[in-house]
Image: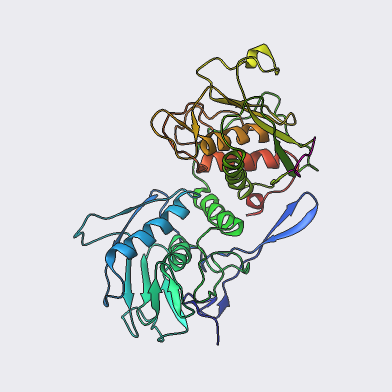
Amino acid sequence: MMLPRCGVADVVKGKNSIQTHKKRKLGIHTVSHYTFTNGMPKWDASKRRLTYRFKSAVEVVGLDDLRSACASAFKRWQDVSVFTFEEAPEGSAEADIEIGFYRGDHGDRSNFDGKFRTLAHAFPPENGHFHYDADESWSVNPTGDTEVDLESVAVHEIGHLLGLGHSLDQSAIMFSKFSYGAIKRDLQPDDIQGIQALKLKHDHGLHTVSHYSFFSGRPKWSPMKTHLTYRFSSSVQVVGLEYLRSACSSAFKRWQDVSHFTFQEASEGAAAADIVIGFHRGNHGDGEQNAFDGPTLAHAFAPEKGWFHYDADEKWSLNPSRDQVDLESVAVHEIGHLLGLSHTPDIPGAIMYPEFSYGIVKRNLHPDDIEGIRVLRRSLGTKDWDQAL
């Protein structure tokens, strides 16, 4: 059986819409596979907050299930782009984006073809229409080989709404084909590179200000050192190793997804690693000026020292209550320092902002954080994807 696919064409008006963007990475030839819609239509530069509403010709799933799937899908793109999304108030007659279920000929000249072929389609900016094929079997948790995951398809179609075409990378959200029963919701590096490259094209010719900063002297890892290992070594046991491992693994992945670095925990019992993470208290041997003194939650050192220390006197948690500190949120911040980023003093939403609150979960990289790590990469003498646009 032919794999079901998105209804957005790979060829538009007789022209192949695929543009391959080449990038060079440490002398290794690599290729980005994201594409843009023909003509590169885009939302107006002033239009960064997009509203959406639901309007269907056919009721297929409950509104609460549809609302939940789409809210989660929008958040995935919001976390890596300049856009924010909000459902329009109940009963609103207008919104930037309209989502619903339709079948057959439904008035947009992109007829649905029944079960087992086109799953959904969405139109490029600023049309804002996103339609599911009502003849498919939709689910928030697909179990059978004829059911389709609502959120997985929503993540893909939102990419089209923002201006992305199909990707040649089969692991990417923007790959054109999909499997019944599958769940594929996580944006891949190619998707993220695409939406951020599209942002750079949006901002061309506009005056923008970046607030990221680097350490004095701009210390950095050697250009040959892009695969970094880490291990855990604490002088005080505060949380279980599995909790610490889980939080740090997730934090490293956030940076890996947007940079040229990869990270891997060193083998059990390894005496050496590029990065050493642990809990310590007071004066713990890395200089009196770095002794934990109460208000400091953690600290990490610039490249290539690789030390990242949590203050053992704080209350640490994976799911913090009001007087606890989130392990992963702090890890994402401190890893930024390990990679060479300093503080971002003017953007409270940035991960690299120097202040943090108890009980808060703040794990998603801000566009300013992402721009900072990529500018740092270019300073290594490597050619990043956004320079070739």
> Against 224, is 134 above or below?
below
Can residue 54 be seen in this snapshot? no
Q: Residue at x 69, y 31 (%)?
A: 233
| Range of magenta residues | 266-271
> Against 132, is 355 above or below?
above
The residue sitting at the left extreme is 91
The image quadrant where one finds the N terminus is bottom right
- Of residues 292 and 238, the one nearer the viewer is 238
Q: Residue at x 46, y 73 (%)?
A: 143
Can residue 234 be seen in this snapshot? yes
Say whether residue 115 is left or right of residue 60.
Answer: right
| Quarter of image, res 290 | top right
| Quarter of image, res 104 | bottom left
Image coordinates of residue 100 in percent, x first then y, are 32, 70
Say whether residue 75 is left or right of residue 339.
Answer: left
| Quarter of image, res 193 | bottom right
Number of callouts = 0
Image coordinates of residue 62 in percent, x first then y, are 28, 68
Question: Residue 269 in magenta?
Answer: yes
Say whether residue 25 is left or right of residue 277.
Answer: right
Image coordinates of residue 299 in percent, x first then y, are 61, 25
Question: Residue 213 in magenta?
Answer: no
- Does the magenta stretch mainly form a helix, a strand or a loop? loop
Colour theme: rainbow
Image coordinates of residue 275 in percent, x first then y, are 71, 35
- Of residues 125 and 215, the one nearer the viewer is 215
Q: Residue at x 40, y 80 (%)?
A: 136
